[in-house]
Amino acid sequence: MATESTSGGDPARTMALLWRSPDGAGRRPGPRPGLDVDRVVAAAVELADREGLAAVTVRRLAAELGVGAMTLYTHVPGKGELVALMHDAVLGELYPEPPAGDWRARLTAVARANWDLYVRHPWAASVGTGRPVLGPNLMRRYDLELAAVDGLGLSEVEMELVVTVVGGFVRGTVGGLHDKDAAERDSGLTEDEWWAATEPLVDRVFDAARFPTAARVGPVAGNELGGYSPERTFEFGLARLLDGIAVLVER
Amino acid sequence: MATESTSGGDPARTMALLWRSPDGAGRRPGPRPGLDVDRVVAAAVELADREGLAAVTVRRLAAELGVGAMTLYTHVPGKGELVALMHDAVLGELYPEPPAGDWRARLTAVARANWDLYVRHPWAASVGTGRPVLGPNLMRRYDLELAAVDGLGLSEVEMELVVTVVGGFVRGTVGGLHDKDAAERDSGLTEDEWWAATEPLVDRVFDAARFPTAARVGPVAGNELGGYSPERTFEFGLARLLDGIAVLVER
DNA sequence: GGCCGTCTCCGTACGGCGTACGGTACTGCC
DNA sequence: GGCAGTACCGTACGCCGTACGGAGACGGCC
């Protein structure tokens, strides 16, 4: 699912940036910086929210900040690290308060908080997690989400699996939202307009006898859900998933 | 989640290619074609399986086929359409036989078939679905998966939602696998090597008092699962999801 | 006060990408 | 035999990320 890599240069440098570790020395000689990591990252997040992660190019971002392209490399080692910093930055929006209530309320809060985050920052769902960038906000999320399933009599492994499954479900489902946004942005067509243009083409090839169930269900679902509806899918799927976890928890 | 767009040129041309509609005329004047769509798509799929979707560039693919870069444009309108054709092509591997058995067996078969497909073709999980490319194999999948949840007393909308949720879960979970592959490929480090290099950096900043649950669960889960384990997540999550769907079906 | 070393900023350039355009050579039909 | 339509593809354009090196600002030291 995720396509945007975050790997790149020196991991120690990346970690230092993520945790904003002071580099030891105080004011050094040289001109006063006109820019800092936080401003760069904030502008990048804002740009990605507005026009998608693909619009965040070094030149574009630099122009938006009113500096030359290569200036960004003074503050950030490279594009990969920038994306990592953006990702950890938006994760910082999660859980102003830790999830509370009974386990079902807590897990619902976890799912909904992640969903809302990805709605605000759709690009964030496509940041690769193959080598998780272990920033402070990712750590905090991991900790709070595990805490949300603590004390239920689950083993450590089960706790980890529950959290991962819920997270994977949210990411998988929100991916549809992200795709819709991206498609609308770079085709300039709303879903209705697209379907109006596509339907006649489908009719020409679609054989109801060959796809009987699709022919019966597709139109009904399409009408009732108003096309593909990630929100409905999220609500429905979350309810099913929680019912399934209940079987495990309340056994 | 998905980042690879498939949009682009004339939808009618794309549909004709996907459905391999004969274009009416027989042999036309001109040199004998040395290449056709199927060979291009097959080579692209093979290359993507081997080195990831990012390795499928027009120049690279053309070189692999022993032709000039621009030659590909004779057979395929553009990169977007190529990806669409690749996607529909691998979907053709699904369901040599329709899922059979009771509903739980059928839905398990659906989930596992998609999982196996994405294991064979990890890049396929990152092909955007914002404007689904309505090829014959996507249609067939949609039809067969809906049929797998037919006759359970679910409404049309519920049928669609169940299928979408299961699909979203599989895609979301397999995303982890894809990320791992991609990260290993372009960092050259296995997960163990990466963790060995990263752990000391984490220890320097990680504060067990600040993240108590993570400090307790993380190491246990890490050891027992051998790092992040998408396979275990899939098995565990599928069991929970089916239990939850059972509550709906057997109400 | 002057110098040195370091830092910020950034112009230029390189090798990639997708693909528009136009040219060339081949071939089926009249 | 000529023509029209096709397959192939060299060149070029505007993007991308970023390596490299130079210019100018500034703190610390003498």
Image: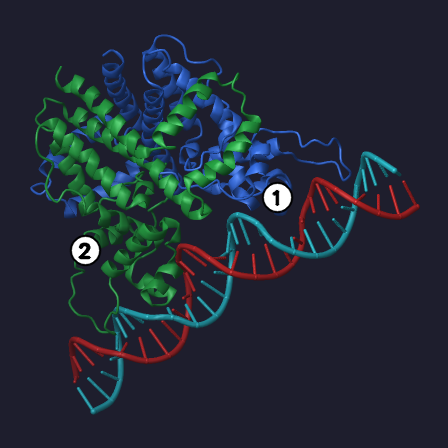
Chain colours: A green, B blue, C cyan, D red
* Point 11% across, 35% down: residue: B213
Is residue A88 found left or right of B140 in the rendered image? left
- A209 relative to B125, above or below: above
Q: Quadrant of residue B62?
A: top right
Is residue A77 found left or right of B35 in the rendered image? left
**Front one among A246 and A5:** A246
Mark 2 and mark 1, same subunit?
no
Q: Quadrant of residue D17?
A: bottom left
Q: CA distance from mark 2 to mark 1?
A: 48 Å
**Front one among A235 and A6:** A235
Label 2 is placed on what type of residue?
Arg
Residue D8 position within the rendered picture, expressed as x and y whole percent measured from the top left: 69, 43
* Point 16% across, 44% down: residue: B203
Residue B73: mark in rendering: 1
**Residue B188 in sight from this viewpoint:** no
**Front one among B135 and D13:** B135
Label 1 is placed on what type of residue?
Tyr
Where does the N terminus of chain A fall, quadrant-wise?
top left
- D7 relative to B146, above or below: below
Subunit ID for the residue under disc 1: B
- A197 relative to A89, above or below: above
Residue A20: mark in rendering: 2
Residue D20 position within the rendered picture, expressed as x and y whole percent measured from the top left: 42, 65
Residue A222 position within the rendered picture, expressed as x and y whole percent measured from the top left: 39, 28
Q: Residues within 10 Å of mark 2 (few under 14, many from 20)?
A: few
Residue B187 position within the rendered picture, expressed as x and y whole percent measured from the top left: 37, 43
Subunit ID for the residue under disc 2: A
* Secondary structure at numbered mark 2: loop
* Secondary structure at numbered mark 1: helix
Where does the C terminus of chain A fall, quadrant-wise?
top left
* Point 25% across, 11% down: residue: B250
